[in-house]
Image (spheres, rainbow, N blue to C red):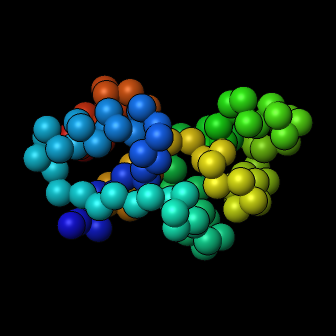
Amino acid sequence: MSKDLQIYFNPNCSKCRSALEILEAENSLFEVVRYLEHPLERGQLEVILDNLSDPVSDLVRKDRKFSELGLNAADYVTRDSVINLILKHPDLMQRPLIQKNGKWSIARSPEKILEILRT
């Protein structure tokens, strides 16, 4: 497996499963990280956010659970607020998250995944 390409993966997520299929079809060497089974530590999240190609606030899923928790998106726009939230609720991390050569991207579309592979 390659540390140069990683996918942070939730097997219950259709976007993650699709991303995995694309990586396999492209014959990419990659590592699968099941982040819900092995929650990230603060230092890992800091590295991700320091090297994320998307806005920091995009790392937070604003889904049904987010609403059920009574959370407000405006409260999660800073690096520290996003880190603290994901440490407490790792399932609120946007996915799939792909790392290639130290650069992190939220890769929800097939086009984004292919773009990452070709850069």
Q: Residue at x 17, y 57 (%)?
A: 29
Q: Residue at x 13, y 40 (%)?
A: 26
Residue 39 picture location, percent across and down:
58, 65
Residue 96 picture location, percent across and down:
44, 42
Can you say which quadrant of the picture contains the C terminus? top left
Q: Residue 116: name its quadrant.
A: top left
Residue 51 picture location, percent across and down:
50, 56
> Is 101 drawn above or below residue 114 in the view shown?
below
| Label tally | 0
Residue 108 seen from this side: yes
- In-front residue for pair 90/78: 90
Residue furthest to the right? 70
> Is 80 drawn above or below residue 28 in the view shown?
below
In the displayed structure image, the side of residue 97 where residue 66 appears, left or right: right
Residue 48 seen from this side: no
In the displayed structure image, the side of residue 97 where residue 68 appears, left or right: right
- In-front residue for pair 17/101: 17
Q: Residue at x 46, y 47 (%)?
A: 10
Residue 88 picture location, percent across and down:
75, 59
Can you say which quadrant of the picture contains the N terminus? bottom left
Q: Residue 85: name its quadrant.
A: bottom right
Residue furthest to the left? 27
Q: Residue at x 84, y 40 (%)?
A: 69
